[in-house]
Image (tube, rainbow, N blue to C red):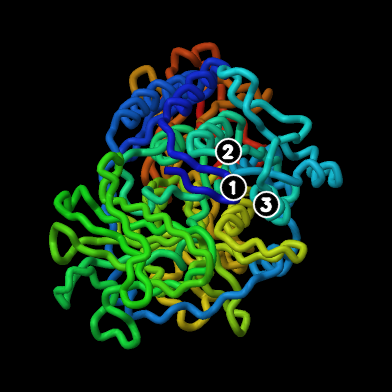
Amino acid sequence: MPTFRNGVALVARPVVELMLVAQSAAVGRSRLTVLAFPLALVAALTVLPLVDAEAQWESTYRQRFMEEVQRKVPPLVLTPPGAAERAAPRAPAAQGIDLKEARTLMGLSRPIVAARLPGGKIAIVDGGFQGIRERLEAFPHEKALTTVMRPGASPTDKLVADPAYAGPWDDDHGYWVYRVVRAVAPDVQVLLYTAGGLSQVASALLHAGTQGVVLSNVSLSFPAHFQIFSHEEDAVSKYLRVYLPQQEAFAFISSGNDRQNIHSFVSADRNNNGYVDFHDRAAPGRDVDSLRLKLRAGKFRTVLTWDASAHPDADYELQIVGAGNRIFYSGRVDPKGKVKGLVFLHHAYSQTADAAIRVKRLAGPASGVFMRVNAYPLGVAGDFNGLQTTNAYLFRENPFVTFVGSFGKAAGGRLAPSPFSNIGTAPDGRLTPHVLGPGQLLIEGRKTNGTSFSSPFITAMYATQVGYNFKNLIARSSNFARFAPGVAAHERSRWGIPDPTLLAKLDDLVGPTRIEDVSHRIEGGTLVVKFAVTRCCMESLSWGIAVGLLDPASGKTLGGALAVVRSDKADFVRHPLEARIPLKSLEAFKGTKAKVRFDIKARRWPNPPPGTLKIHQAPAYDVTL
């Protein structure tokens, strides 16, 4: 069942296209690495000759990749809204912020310069970029840094550059996303991908990972049956679970704008009248059995979902009722549908109407079923609690995906979550989204409200920090200090809002990368160089310390080895490593006094921009061969 955003249908399709893109990309680019993301990562130490390191990475992770592809998706288990969430007051009203003011609020008094990320790239995956041709023609500097991608002419030529910027597009949503990125990072290369469906989104992300893209920004509209319980894994979810960690690329994804249209609750029928209670009996001014709506003229759809896998015997009828409990519309689960526990109800009105949603229990337990009602389109005025409005994508948690919600400006200049921005709890009990950015933006007087605009803002802010795990950096540089009074704990996101004070000293926050405690020994026919390394924010990235032996007179490299690390740890403090260099390879230099040099190598960035991967402190150390 498709859902629409600005006329673009997003349809869940099989992942066959995604797999074909992976294969064709691998044929066309021999160095494309498709790595696995193991379920439980453990610290690994492998000592390899420098020339063999990449081959070893390829072999190891290809095997893990195949294991992950074949793994079935575990069922989603959501936490119902708790008593504290229900009792907490709503956040104060949040107003729009001019884009220039948003830059100031986030500490960007001057643009992030490309010198910090020469050669770096951001991908924007969106529904359309209408207006981009005119923009790029008017701004040659941006044109030189922007590539528009389009589908190729043949099935084997999936994505190619579009030098004419021709589209075709009937949607300008991505254009305004691009404008946000350029306002924050004017000198970074940007690739634009148009995607009209979930399979195309996944294919675009996969392709971007083969083009040297450091991180991607994605704005998605979510099919209704992924709002709670996804019984079939769609292409984007599979990309986030399997391919994104394999590429060790990063994706920033908007958290969604459904909070004003979703009501989550646990079924109960306290008055035994056959209708599920939406509210506590004691709540003043509320009908226990219904959810009030103020409907304008037009077409709507309302969706009821529950966990049919946990409650296979449950069955409900979704009703739209008017005055005197007159039933305007009603609907039940489609017996031929693939997704159980899902009721779609389409309804339309020729004039404004006061109505209410009711859920009639037909079978199953009288209480204890976690349910959700979602009303479309956005902006339906109703008695919604706005709790647990997350969707299935927000549970595809791994170290390479970050979900971004939105904030606006409240009274007194403090900040508050946007009323539309999704919130909720991940299956492990932690809050989602991860962080909030400015999403109620005015761009040249145009209102662009949505997490689709807070996400690219955060993406561009951190794009210069190549060489680290971006999620680790966001966690270190965000807090809750600037929220207005009255923002409940469950509304603030997991880490809050990036703090300009912390961002200004981000280099200090990540701390220097240090090599300490260097020593060596001869073990059989091997020179063993031992040392300890300190480096932060490297969760699940494949990296290593290269130990090279240099002739101090000529600067010529005599030999070396690489100590490789990949771990679920974010921070490494005096982490012991050793490089083992065969003495046989050094026989020609016997008796030579060699200088030991340390360098960082990263699988994700085999040819990093100069100065982005560096060791800040390392002792001088010599060894006689």
On the image, the x and y values in percent for residue 45 come to 36, 33
From the image, tell me which residue sits under label 3.
181
**Mark 3 to mark 2 CA distance (whole Å):** 18 Å
Mark 1 vs 3, N-terminal side: 1
**Mark 1 to mark 3 CA distance (whole Å):** 23 Å
On the image, the x and y values in percent for residue 303 come to 37, 56
On the image, the x and y values in percent for residue 332 come to 28, 53
Mark 2 vs 1, N-terminal side: 1
> What is the crowding at mark 2: few (fewer than 14 residues within 10 Å), some, or many (at least 20)?
many
> Which residue is pictured at 34% across the width and 29% down the height?
69
Q: Secondary structure at mark 1?
A: loop
Q: Label 1 is placed on what type of residue?
A: Gly
Q: Secondary structure at mark 3?
A: helix
Q: Label 3 is placed on what type of residue?
A: Val
Tell whether 234 sits left or right of 469: left
Q: Label 2 is placed on what type of residue?
A: Ala
Say if 125 sits above or below 386 in the image. above
Q: Secondary structure at mark 2?
A: loop
From the image, tell me which residue sits under label 1.
7
**Circles 3, 2 touching at the beta carbon (< 8 Å):** no
From the image, tell me which residue sits under label 2.
195
> Which residue is pictured at 52% across the width and 54% down the height?
254
**Circles 2, 1 touching at the beta carbon (< 8 Å):** no
Nearest the eye: 220 or 468: 220
